[in-house]
């Protein structure tokens, strides 16, 4: 198997193993066994369990960043932007094969490498949401970024909670509760708006 394909296969198996057992209970031996390879083969691609976990985290963060950026760039309409951005988080956790728990509910959220990477991700997304908000509100860049961080924190937490309780509420309903809340707050700062929330 080509190296890139093997790496992708190992990451897929590791993702499922971490999801089922958590980081601490999922050993490299178990991951190798589940992948049908020897442990030395696994170590050819990843120097440690943490290295493997970080690779998975980076992959999921890249996927979510791309989704949020697409939402931010899809429209210049303020309401559509807010709604699409919140929905991107819910779509992310609902995606088949998503390892959203690595991002939202990591066993290692206090480990230095993981904590730093998650903070970088949240700061980056908060800044980009803030930059978009600044284009259609009366907020200065610092205020808009602060609000952007609040939006991403709310969307992230709510999407993760919905995934755990999805039998109680549809994704569409849960997402709508959050984007309506976000829009009610942001709408008060619009410089001018002809947008009507449905």
Image: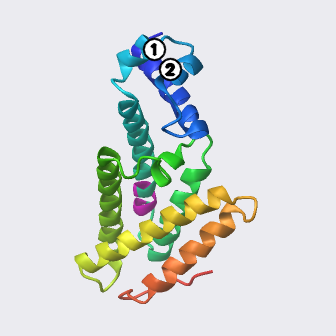
- Hey, which residue is sitting farthest front in the picture? 25
Residue at figure coordinates x 38%, y 41% from the top left: 58
Where residue 85 appears, x then y in whole percent? 48, 64
Q: Residues within 10 Å of mark 1 (few under 14, many from 20)?
A: some
Q: Which residue is mark 2?
A: 29
- Crowd rating for badge 2 (residues with CA inside 10 Å; few <14, some 14–19, many 20+): some
As drawn, 6 above or below 138: above
Task: Identify the residue position indicated by label 1 in the image.
Answer: 39
Residue at image position (34%, 65%) is 126
Q: CA distance from mark 1 to mark 2?
A: 6 Å
Circle 2: element type: helix
Quarter where residue 153 is shown: bottom left
Examine the residues drawn in magenta and state their main secondary structure. Answer: helix
Q: Can the viewer see residue 84? A: no
User: Which of these two is toward me, 141 or 27?
Assistant: 27
Examine the rendered structure and indicate whether residue 5 appears above or below residue 86: above
Badge 1 or badge 2: first in the primary sequence: 2
Q: Is residue 110 above or below residue 128?
A: above
Q: Are marks 1 and 2 in contact (CB under 8 Å)?
A: yes
**Residue at left offset 34%, top offset 82%:** 137
Range of magenta residues: 69-73
- Lateral position of residue 151 relative to residue 142, left or right: right
């Amino acid at each position: 198997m080509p190296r890139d394909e093997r790496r992708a296969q190992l990451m897929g198996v590791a993702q499922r193993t971490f999801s089922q057992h958590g980081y601490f209970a999922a050993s490299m031996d178990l991951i190798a066994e589940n992948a049908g390879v020897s442990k030395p083969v696994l170590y050819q691609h990843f120097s440690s369990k943490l290295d493997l976990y970080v690779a998975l985290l980076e992959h999921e963060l890249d996927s979510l960043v791309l989704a949020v950026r697409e939402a931010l760039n899809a429209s210049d309409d303020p309401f559509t932007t807010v709604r699409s951005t919140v929905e991107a988080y819910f779509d992310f956790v609902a995606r088949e094969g998503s390892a959203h728990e690595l991002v939202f509910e990591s066993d290692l959220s206090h480990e230095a490498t993981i904590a730093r990477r998650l903070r970088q991700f949240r700061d980056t997304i908060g800044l980009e949401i803030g930059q978009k908000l600044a284009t259609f509100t009366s907020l200065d860049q610092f205020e808009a970024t602060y609000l952007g961080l609040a939006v991403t924190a709310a969307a992230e937490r709510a999407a993760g909670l919905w995934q755990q309780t999805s039998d109680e509420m549809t994704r569409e309903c849960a997402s709508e509760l959050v984007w309506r809340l976000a829009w009610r707050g942001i709408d008060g700062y619009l410089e001018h708006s002809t947008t009507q929330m449905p």
